[in-house]
Amino acid sequence: MGGTIADLLITLGKSIGAFNEHNEAAVKENLAPNIVVGSVRTEKTLRGTDGINNITNNFKDNPTFTLVRLDIDLKGDNDGTATKATLTGKAKWKDNHDPKKPENIQFTFDCVFMEKNWSFQKVVADIV
């Protein structure tokens, strides 16, 4: 059995809230241990602990992530539950580099339903 769209949206909301509060432990709760992170600034792909650390290392720049648009693909499942999903969309990213001018980013989050919870398995973002 998979997870619901509602649960996926709750996980996304909690994750964005934790990220914006710079709550490292809460952010890590929803990251798969084998996560793949596409880093915009370093243009590298990082895996596992290196990927998780890349996400939380952003906290030193006091970032905020504001969702602007979101699309959900349940990977062919159509009964309202799924074991895999892809979230794509756009967001505003603001940090200490230029706090008065947020950057527009486009993101893709691949999610997997594991052990009763949704987790982010791949996170990629690009400045647009």
Image (cartoon, helix red, strand yellow):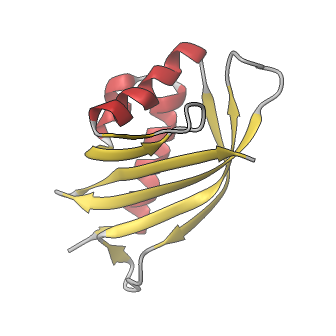
4 to 65, vertically: above or below: below
Residue sitting farthest toward the left: 115
- Residue 83 in view: yes
Residue visible at 49% across and 38% down in the picture = 44
**Front one among 17 and 128:** 128
Q: Quadrant of residue 78?
A: bottom left
User: Is residue 68 rendered to the left or right of residue 70?
Assistant: right
Residue visible at 47% across and 65% down in the picture = 86
**Front one among 110 and 8:** 110
Residue 71 locus on image (x, y percent): 59, 66
Residue visible at 37% across and 36% down in the picture = 51
Residue visible at 29% across and 37% down in the picture = 29
User: Is residue 64 rendered to the left or right of residue 12?
Assistant: right
**Front one among 46 and 117:** 46
Q: Quadrant of residue 55?
A: top left
Residue 17 locus on image (x, y percent): 50, 35
Residue 4 locus on image (x, y percent): 36, 68
Residue 38 locus on image (x, y percent): 49, 44
- Residue 22 in view: no
